[in-house]
Image (cartoon, helix red, strand yellow):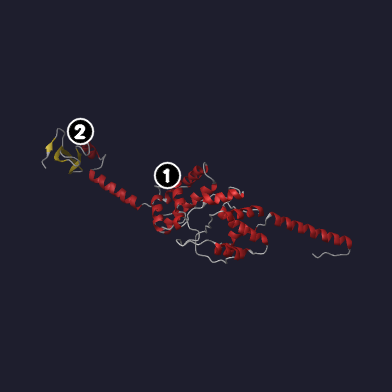
Amino acid sequence: MTRKKTNYPRVFYRETKRIATPGIEKVFYVVFKKDRKVYEEKVGRQYADDMTRARASGIRGERIEGKCLSRKEIRKEREAQQEAEQSRWTFDRLWQEYQVRNPALKGFVTDSNRYQKHIQTLFGGKEPNSLSTFDIDRLRIKLLKDHSPGTVKNVMELLQRLVNFGVKKQLCEGTKFVIEMPKVNNIKTEDLSPEQLTRLLEEIEKDTNIIMDPNGGPGQKIPLSGAAREILDNHPRSDNSPFVFPGRDGKRRVDIKKQVDRIKERAGIPKDFRALHGLRHVYASMLASSGQVDLYTLQKLLTHKSPAMTQRYAHLRDETLKSASELAGNLVAKVTEAGKQNPNLKLAR
């Protein structure tokens, strides 16, 4: 292509085809000398870069003074930045990789919502080792304004889980400090009075929908009681579904909230009673309160991994405590009465 001079010193252009649309446009170049070396550089296209003779002349002056980079240098710098960005394991990248490597992640939907709502906005583009305690405090304070301590702890745990994942897989460095978890006392052990339990069982018997939702994890084997076996033996069987409690069209049932809430309301059970978890707690509390089942056996029945999880059921119901208190009073009364009748009686120590 032929050089065409302009009225600006050492600024020329060549004509070529336009990139996006038909037609011809000018491509501007500048020539300058720096450090005893002559440079000829392309500075931009007439339409694609909105380049003019005057702008080209201005760029030439900046290049001579070292105030700007050449297009080649800018391109190399951009490529280096992109390469560096691709090598950065930000929380966004860690979250994506975490999902890929944990396809059957339990509670994925909940974790995804927590990440998008609470973590991504503040930390999505940051690397774990760039966080400061101030960043964590800011997140904690922001969450506590509208959320319960339990929710804050769940978000912090997800954040820590992503950091641990990145470190374990040698993708990134961890934080320079320990992320402190809020202390939350959210242990809830539901229980029902004998009257409530009776009403609940009556309503379950009347209702046409009910299902048990076991916790996930490895398979467990526990003895099936005679009463439970009788219920299953008498339960209607479906010829077109492999499920004990099939959903619509024989498919797997995925939600029973509507049915459970209906049964609770009819039985007069408190709204905050978590039906499925709650019945498990009632079962455990009844056995623990009976005095006939030790905590180790109860732990095995509940498939708890540690005794600490079963310890919450070691409490006794009010009527059991009252009976024990009455027994203690009666024993003291008997001893006192025996002492009055026989002053020489010596009590064993």
Kindly indicate the quadrant of the structure image that contains residue 43.
top left
Question: Quick one: label 2, few (<14), some, or many (20+) residues within 10 Å?
Answer: few
Nearer-the-camera pick, 284 or 43:
284
Disc 2 on helix, strand or loop? Answer: helix
| Residue 34 percent location from the top left of the image | 20, 42
- The disc placed on residue 121 is 1
Locate the C terminus and report the quarter of the image it occupies: bottom right
CA distance separating discs 1 and 2: 43 Å
| Residue 112 percent location from the top left of the image | 44, 50
Q: Label 2 sits on what residue type? A: Ala
Nearer-the-camera pick, 34 or 283:
283
- Which one is closest to the eye, mark 1 or mark 2? 1
Q: 262 left or right of 108?
A: right
Q: Label 1 sits on what residue type? A: Thr
| Residue 142 percent location from the top left of the image | 49, 42
Q: Is residue 189 among what the camera can see?
A: no
Query: Which residue is located at x 44 percent, y 47 percent?
Result: 119
Return the residue at label 2: 54
Question: Quick one: label 1, few (<14), some, or many (20+) residues within 10 Å?
Answer: few
Q: 61 left or right of 341?
A: left
- The disc placed on residue 15 is none
